[in-house]
Each structure stands twice: as structure tokens, then as C-alpha cells.
Amino acid sequence: MVEAVLAAPAVETPSPMDDALRVLVQEGCIQCNKCTFNCPVHRVDALFSPRKVILQAYLGGGDEVNERDLWACLTCGECQAVCPTQVPYPAFIRAKREKLRDSTERLAPCKHGGFKEILAEIMAKPGLRQDRRAWIGDGLKVAEKGDVIYFTGCMPYLDGVFSYCDSAQIGRSAIRLMNAAGIVPVVANAERCCGHDALWNGKQETFEKLARANAKWILETGAKRLVTTCAECYSMLKYEYPKAVGPWPLEVLHMSELLEELVQQGRLKFTKPLDLKVTYQDPCRLGRHSKEYDAPRAVLKALPGVQFTEMDRVRENAMCCGVGAYSNCDAATKFMQQERLEEAASKADHLVTACPHCRIHFSCYLDGKPVDPLPPLKIVDLTVLAAEALG
Amino acid sequence: METVDVSAVIQLLEAEGILHEAGELKGYASDASFLTLGVPNLIVFPKDEAECVKLVEMAVKHRLALVPRGTASSTAGASVAPAGALLVDMQRVGACDARGHRRGLFTPQVVSAKGEPADLAKAGPEDELYVRVGAGRTSDETNRALAKAKWIVAVTPSSGYSTFGGNFATNARGSGTPAYGAFGDAVNRLRLVTSTKEGAKVVEVSEREEILRLAGNHGLFGLITELDVRIAPILKAEEMLCAILSIESPDAQHLGAVMGALMKRVAASCQYFAGEFLFIDAGIVRPDDPVRNDPVLGGYFVVTPGVRKMVLVYRGKKAGMAALPAIAAESREVAYREITYAQFRTMMSVRTAATGKSLHRVNVPGCEDFLIEDPSRFGDVLAAMFAVTAGADGRPVGHHYPDGVVVHYRPQMPVNRSGIEQGWALNQRLRDAVLKKEFTVSDRVEHGLGLALFKDTPKKRQDELRKLKAKYDPANVFCPHLLEKGVEGRFVGAELVI
């Protein structure tokens, strides 16, 4: 079984303690505070401290996480990435949210009117009928059966809420790229939400329902590979589904990994110079959660006319886009986004992401009223950029 | 806060707009020791020197005791507040913008020994340069900012994430100490908010002897707000020598004697920036840690049951380390290998985590920091140490400094009261076994005395501390408990919260 990098490894059960605390103590916090210094939330809210939460949990037997601390965490994993003993703080928070979910006042922390949470709950229902292909449009080929599935995630629904993003463009670009390489992907009406937000926001049962529903149709297709353009879907399908649904005999790829492979095999050629200065945002779920740092960079370097410059904080040290699983978005988020976008704007005029949610959160910030003036900066999805380079 | 209730203090803080948190603050009940003096009920987060001044004025006026705290990554207890004291979190001071937000990236001001602005791009390796940094900044952050110019903070404790104010308060040592001394030796100027009988006063200290007297202050004299901290050029790869020396033996006494003799020769013949050692056991890194598959380093993590394996790594200038290969070759039991700087850093990461790395355990300090002045007694100390710690989780790690060998060891115990008390008891047995004059061992040299300040400081230093206290804190608002008898005893036992 493939283990998610940020998930807690299976270990023997120690003396009686709750699941969350068990996750926490298995690596042994040394109270060094490095997590807190590197936490993007702490930098704008001195009262928020992962180290403090850990000590409270130890001293209080695990029940001492207040609602603010429970939901302010982005589960971005910067804390774990710098932890000398790799304490799995995000996994602790995930377990804690599951345990405390029903006892906290804020039952639905999901922003945007609870859109994402409601969507997941609807999709977890049996007998659901969807038209998930209306966005595809003419000229793009998709199939009912085949070796490769394109798992769109919630992308078809996003434009109904985040009108400033045209998220469906990511899907059209993905199909166009695959078609150009001779791949006709399966896009299924039976697809459900991957369950990412449900899992990270403490709704394990909903996640498992969604995973089982998706596994059923995915396995029935007999596909050998599944490709997604979403970092969150990728981390779920690659690392969490095998744990939730059992044998998982297909290869899960992020679109950047497929593109890198197709370019290496000579099946895809980028011919149109783009003349852009770009930098890259490592999505937490693709980077720290899944350790995929190289493929997106390889794709960017393969695009003609793209001048790629790294930001100062990259890969495992990359700063989060400011929102995790739509559980939080407040003034602190805006300051985090300002800091990260300033960093991006100091390097390039386009910030490329490989997750539609990073793109939404940054675009949302730019669409609103930035905290401080920012140089012009465009937020672009990697898949869209690659499709533009097809010519 | 025996004379003012918490709600009254909160009103004062709110009137001044100083960020604070009140309640049963278990998350601030300890430092890196997991042991407590009590659970604080009020912590303040000043964002700059001006707010520190307001705090001190408030403390003098209302007879509040202030306990400054950096990252509280120390284990000496000085950053833990006793009941009734006001904890002052200094992490934001000089490290955040006007809104109070800390920036992940910053550009430190570089100054000369005279305090004049200096240009790092034009600096040469022999220039004596400092960064002028806020007390809440850390070596990690500063090193990231200096990396492009190929400079680093000269003295960086293993906890590169501890604040500069905290490093000065404990007079911490670490990487760079063999060449630059303790942290206090690397500070050229500092600003602190002190008390007067009537209120607060900002003091700037640049006289070398006075800085050295203030180093290791444990928060007794004021709130440090800014320091000039020595930086050093990063050696070029072709100038640097990094090496691993390893030895295996079932006999700890013999192993220690061999390595102690070797370290003595190294101290006499080599100039180095860092000398670090660790004992490797099966649990020191996870089974899936990539270091196990490293073609060069992986072999050091293969252990044989019943055999102790010690690894000693050095980093220095090639010219200063020329004698090292020959010294290593004098013992057939010692394997010598040169490694890259990146590999050295990987070993340092393992070394940093090693004191606390054990599944389902927390590390319990208490006798985790002692100096063996004569390295030739290293074998005797190890034999005594391993005899006491047999069967317990945890492993020794430490530093080789020119003035001796610092050993860190923390037993690792289950996270419950019984486990931690067992760890503490083990530490007491360890103290009895190793803190002996004939072993030339002295206690708490690197992590500072903290709560043991009164008990373990020589009388001469106690007198000096009292004079400094009278000079900088005549109102006696900063950590007054540290100069009381019996504070250390309250650190554990009756007041243990778990």
C-alpha cells in the first residue's frame, strides 16, 4: 500500500489515549518551536502556535484544542516539513477535527456559503445523476471506456461560484493536451467529489462514502491510469483511496507527471513560444503531501519562451496559498496571500500553479482588495499554460 | 501578579493595545523540557521595543513580575513562568512589520564592528561583520537571508530556530563555537528595556566586558530588543573539509577512551568550526528515512546488536584540519571518511533530532547537558552513563569544543505523569553517576542554568548577577524568582502538572 507522506505511519498502540494524541506522540515532539516559526498562520496571528497546541494536548490528555486552533490550521504541512522529528501535526489536526467535529459550535467551517461541503454531501448520496461533461465543448474527444481516466474533480462545478477563474478551461486544456498525444480519456458522469475537504475537515464517513462510490466506477472501467489536474484529488486518489477502498490497481498521475512523460517520449511537442516570465507555486497537496516537486518544473522548462524563476521559498519550504480545504478564510489569510504574491511578483509576472484551488484562492485575493499595492501578476494553471504552448 | 488581578492587567494591556492571551494557558506551561512550574494565566506578545517599554512601565507601576520568553526551546526553565508572573513572548520583537506580522523573508542590516553600515557584497572573508537584528529573529531566518551572499551567523545553536534574545539569555553554544566562542562572545552590541524605580529605560550596551557579563542573563535584567550578532563567510567547497570518524565497540568505556583521546589530539592540533557526535541505534531515524539509502551515509545507520556505534563529524577549513586524517589513522578502530558539506548537514539534521527521536515518547531532560573538561575521561563517563541508562530509550549526542566534550542525553518516556516522573528519576541517578569531580564534569554549561541559577552558580557569579540586577533592574520586575532559593525544586514533583 502506498502511504501518504504526511499521514501517520501505522505503529503499535501505546497506553490509552485518543487517536489524535496517538498520532502526535508517535514521533515525539521536542518542543523546539520550529513548527510555529515556520507556520504561515502564526506569522500573522501570534496567538496561533502548533507547538502550543501540542503541549496543550500532552498536558491535557488530548482534549485541549480550542475551536480557533482546530480550524485555523491550513494543514499545509510546513510545520512537519521543518520538524526535526517529523511530528505529523496535520494528521493530528485531521484526527482532532474528526473527533471534535460534532462538539464544536462551528459545524460547517466551509467558506463560500458551505458550497464545497454541501457539494460533497450531495455527491455522497446514492443514486445521484449528474451531467459532468457539459463544459467540454466541441472538438475535444472523450470516451466512456479506455485505459486513461481524466478525473476532473469538482472543477465542472467551480465556475458556478468562482466566476473570476474559468476553471473549466483547465479541464478543456487537459483534454486537448491528452488528445494531442493520442489519448482519448474517460470522463465519467459517475464521478463524485474526491472527498478531500471532507477528510481534512473531519468528515471521515463522508470521505469513505465518496471514495467507495468513485472506486466502483473507476474499477469498472478497467482503466490502467487515472490523471487529474487537481493536487487535492491527486493526494486523495493516490494515497488515501488505497487505504479506504482496498486494492487499487491503477496508476494515479498528476497532469504535470503525464505531461513530463509525454514530452520525454516525444508524444507531445510544445511549439508556440509564450514569451512569459513565470514562477511556480508548489501546491501543498502536490508538494509537501505528495513529494511531487519536479514534474511541474520539468513541464515549465519544456515550454518555449517561458522564463522560469524560482521564488525564495520553494518545494518543501513553499508557502501555502492561504486556504486549506476551504475551512478558513479571514484577514489572516489575506495577509498570507499578500506576502506570497509579493514574493511571486518580485520574480515574475505570471504565477503558475498546479492546483485549481491555489489558483482560486490567489485569484480571489487579487479580485478583491489587496492589503497593499501589488505589481501586476497573473495567476495561471500549469495545464492551461501547457495547452497554450501547443500552438 | 500577586498584587494585581488578571482582569485588571488585561484592562491595562487593552488600553495600551498590546496583544495578549488569558486563561489556563497549558500551551505555555513549559519549555522544551515538558516540565512545568505551573500553568500561566496571562501571556503578552509585544511587537516592538515601544510596547516593551510600556510593559515594563506597567510592571514597575503595578508590581508585576515579567518572565521574558523567546521560543522557550531551552530546557533550563528560565522561560517558564511561576504562578503570578506575566509571561512575555519576545518572538515578534524586532521581527515583524508595523501590523505585528512576521515576514518569512527579511533583509538584515549588516554593520561593522563599529556599528557602521557595511556592504556584504564588498566584504572580504577577514572582515568582522555583524547583523543588526531584532531579539525575536532566529539564526535559521537570518541564515536564509544571508545565504545568497554566502554568509552565515557565526554561532548557531543546534536549535537554529531559537531567538537571538534567547541565545544570549542562555549564552548558548553551537556550530561555530570552536572558532567564535559562545553566543555572548559573538554579540557586539545590544539594546534592552530595563527598569528604573519609576518606570522603564532603554539601554544600549556595547562595552565588551559588560556584554560578556550580561550573557547568560536568563531574563534577569530586562527585555532584550536588538542585538548586533557576528556573521561569518561560508567556506567555499574547495576550502572546506567535512569528515566522519566512526567507531564500533561493545565496550562503552573503551570506545569513549579511544574517541576521547582522539578528540584531545584534535583540539590540540586542529582548528574547526563544528565537531559533533552521536550514537547510532536502530531507532535514531525512521525505517523509511532516505538517509538509510544514501550511498555514503547509509552505512553509518546499520547497527549490530550489542555493539555501540559512535559517529563524530567535523567541519573546518582544510588548512586548519590538515592533521585530522593522521590523527584518525592513529587508531585502527576509527574509520575516517571525508564527506561533502551537504552530507555534513544531513548528519546534523539527524543529530538535531536525535535527542528527541523515539516513537511514542517525549524526552525528559534534567541531566541532559554536561561538559567533560578532560576528554580523556570520556570513556569513564560513558561507561557510568550507559550503566545507568541501560534499558531506557534515548541516546547521547553532543559537541566537541576546544574546552571539552558536551554531552546531551534525555531519556524518552511515555507521555504520562508516571513516564515523565520515571524519566526525571533516571536523570537524578544519572546526575549522581556522572557529575563527579574526578570525571572533570560540570553541569548545564551549554543550555544554561535557568532555574538552577541560584543553586549551581559559583558564589562569585551569583554576586555579579546581583550587582547587575541592581544596576539594570532596580525595581526587580524581571524574573525575580530566579534568584530565590528552591525554585528548581518547584520545577518538578509537587508542581508537575501532567
Image (cartoon, coloured by chain):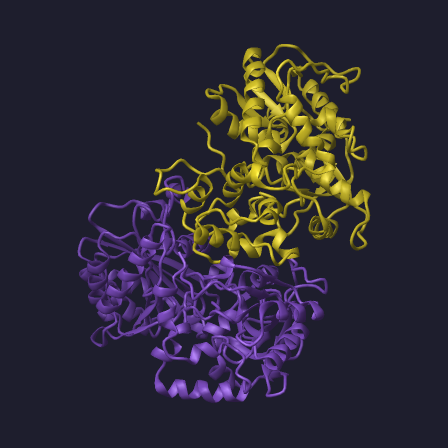
Quarter of the picture containing the C terminus of chain B is bottom left
Nearest the camera: A144 or B483?
A: B483
Residue A332 versus residue A281 in the image, above or below: below
User: Residue visible at 73% across and 28% down?
Assistant: A170
Tell whether A93 sits left or right of B326. right
For the N terminus of chain B, the image quarter is bottom right
Horizontal side of residue B390 vs B397, given as left or right: left
Q: For residue A236, which quarter of the picture? A: top right
B370 sits left or right of A370 in the view: left
Count of numbered circles in the view: 0
Residue B491, percent from left and from top: 39, 67
Q: Colour of chain B?
A: purple
Q: Residue A88: percent from the left, percent from the top? A: 48, 44
Residue A390 is at least partly visible in this image: no
Q: Quadrant of residue B247?
A: bottom left
The residue lying at 51 percent from left, 57 percent from top is: B27
Q: Which chain is yellow?
A: A
Visible residue check, residue A148: yes
- Across and down, in percent, residue A49 comes to 56, 54
Q: Nearer the viewer, residue B3 or A36?
A: B3
Residue drawn at point x = 54 percent, y = 64 percent: B41
Q: Is residue B131 left or right of residue B421?
A: right
Residue A58, relative to residue B468: is it above or below? above
Name the foreground residue: B311 vs B60. B60
Position above or below: A351 against B265: above
Residue B309 lies, in percent from the top left, at 26, 53
